[in-house]
Amino acid sequence: MALNISRAFVYNEGSYMATFDPRAKLILAIIMIVASLTIYTPLKAAILAIFMILLAAASGNLKRVASSLLFAVPFLIIIAGGEMLISRSVYASLGYSMRFANLVLAGSTAFTSMSPDEFEFVIRWLGASGDFAFLLSATFRFIPLLALDLEQIVQVQRARGVDFSTRNPVKWVSGMSSVLVPLIVVSIIRSGEMAEAMELRGYGVRSKTRPPFRFRFGARDAALVIGGVALFAILLLVKV
Amino acid sequence: MIELLDIWHSYGNRQVIKGISERFEDGRVYAIIGRNGSGKSTLLRIMAGLIRPTRGVALVNGKDIGSMKPREAIKEVGIVFQNPDYQLFEETVYREVEFALKNLGIENNREQMVGWALRELGLEGLKDRPPLTLSGGEKKRLTIAAVIAWRPRALLLDEPTVGQDQAFKELLMRLIKGHAEKGGPVIISTHDMEFLWKLNPNAVLISDGVVLCRGEFRRLALKECFRSTFEVLPGLAALTRALGLSDPLVDDKEAVEAIMKWR
């Protein structure tokens, strides 16, 4: 299975998850994110991770969601190593790194199953202003672009001899700075260009109205939300 | 020498390279041309060992670049990417050029090598400037300096002339020829047909992931495969055709003479 980081956070129109009501998908994403942040025992975190992986597999997003874990690996190592140094507890370091892995999985589940447009419609449906909804959906749209930039920058720096697989922490940090600085610079340039391009195309000149989105919340949407809530409740209440 | 043996590559379900086999000899300049999305950049990345093809092998001096250690591969093949902003991060121009030399563990002559690369690209006066404050053209020159500094045998350039002025193109042309004379192949991927007409490299035209035709650029530009791919010809190619000449016109002087004769 070829994993591709740049696809890890990109909406998959053809997946089964994409067919659900956007509100159900957003609620599920919020539940998964909150669960990822609150559940820290390794076993419970593993159950949550398995649930999200099974959900991704059932909906045809397994490759993308698995790719997000590839992206998380260096950070997982830092978190686990840092926690080991501070608490000297394998249990705690495993718990914290699992928590981060789950957060990444939850993010990938959300981004691969919901389009930026759907996200904007749900935010508007919740009563947010058009500007605010657009701001959030623009951020949503930026994530895959950022992932694509990240992949390109990693290739560029690899071609200049940066070894991202090194075990030497000094070299690793130096390698990461060669990625993070261009990533931030490219993001700032892109956001500035995007803002200018929007203004030049008349953004803000007229009131922002969009055609209403027809939501369809059916039984399977309810089942998805109930399943997510039930899992979260069980993980919170059951002592393992 | 770089040799591609039956290279196939796909992104998801999209097949971008479909069985390309090519040989790029030492000491020669090549151009990979084709329309947007034809697979040019992917092919360059495969040759640099940054992407493993789904099928086939890219050999550099007889060794599979995919199985080489990164440090070994980089010494053999240097690649300059299109967007300078993806690369620059150091505090000064000098340190940006020095960065790869440090990664490659080059201690002896490091200063001279950086100095040489900066001189080659006309950047010696900017060596203490932060790279991010340079102009677009200067950034581009810096990315090239940062790669040629360790003198990789083969040099790959992805769209090196985008947004660049004529003076830079002249400098680049000299640099390309100089590098080819001293070492391995120089391979350019570009849409800049006027630049290629002047440089006249060995061109490989790819379309939809396969090689459509190949040959010396000026002669290739007069062929049907070129016309059917690009629709618009380089100026002197169009003039050569219009005047019904069998040999391509090399420069403006020849063009004027040919027109005068035709009249």
Image (cartoon, helix red, strand yellow):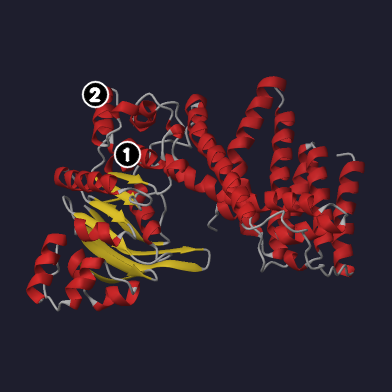
The mark nearer the N terminus, 2 or 1, is 2
Identify the element where label 1 is drawn. helix
Name the residue beneath numbered marker 1: B147
Work out which residue is located at the far left of the displayed protein and give it.
B261
Residue at 65%, 25% in the rendered image: A82
Residue at 77%, 57% in the rendered image: A120
Q: Nearer the viewer, residue A201 or A87?
A: A201
Disc 1: host chain: B
Name the side, left or right, on which A123 lies relative to A56. right
> Distance from label 2 to label 1 (Cα)?
16 Å
Q: Quadrant of the C terminus of chain A?
A: top right
Residue at 39%, 39% in the rendered image: B139
Name the side, left or right, on which A159 lies relative to A172. left
Q: Residues within 10 Å of mark 2 (few under 14, many from 20)?
A: few
Disc 2: host chain: B
Name the amino acid, label 2: Asn
- 2 and 1 marks in contact (CB < 8 Å): no
Identify the element where label 2 is drawn. loop
On the image, the x and y values in percent for residue B176 come to 22, 47
The quadrant holding residue A3 is bottom right
Residue B20 numbered mark, or none: none
Name the side, left or right, on which B259 lies relative to A148. left
The quadrant holding residue B95 is top left
Q: Is residue B251 visible?
A: no
On the image, the x and y values in percent for residue B231 come to 33, 74
Q: Is residue B158 visible?
A: yes
Name the residue beneath numbered marker 2: B109
Name the amino acid, label 1: Val
Q: Residues within 10 Å of mark 1 (few under 14, many from 20)?
A: many
Q: Quadrant of the N terminus of chain A?
A: bottom right
On the image, the x and y values in percent for residue B57 come to 33, 58
Q: Is residue A233 above or below residue B232?
A: above
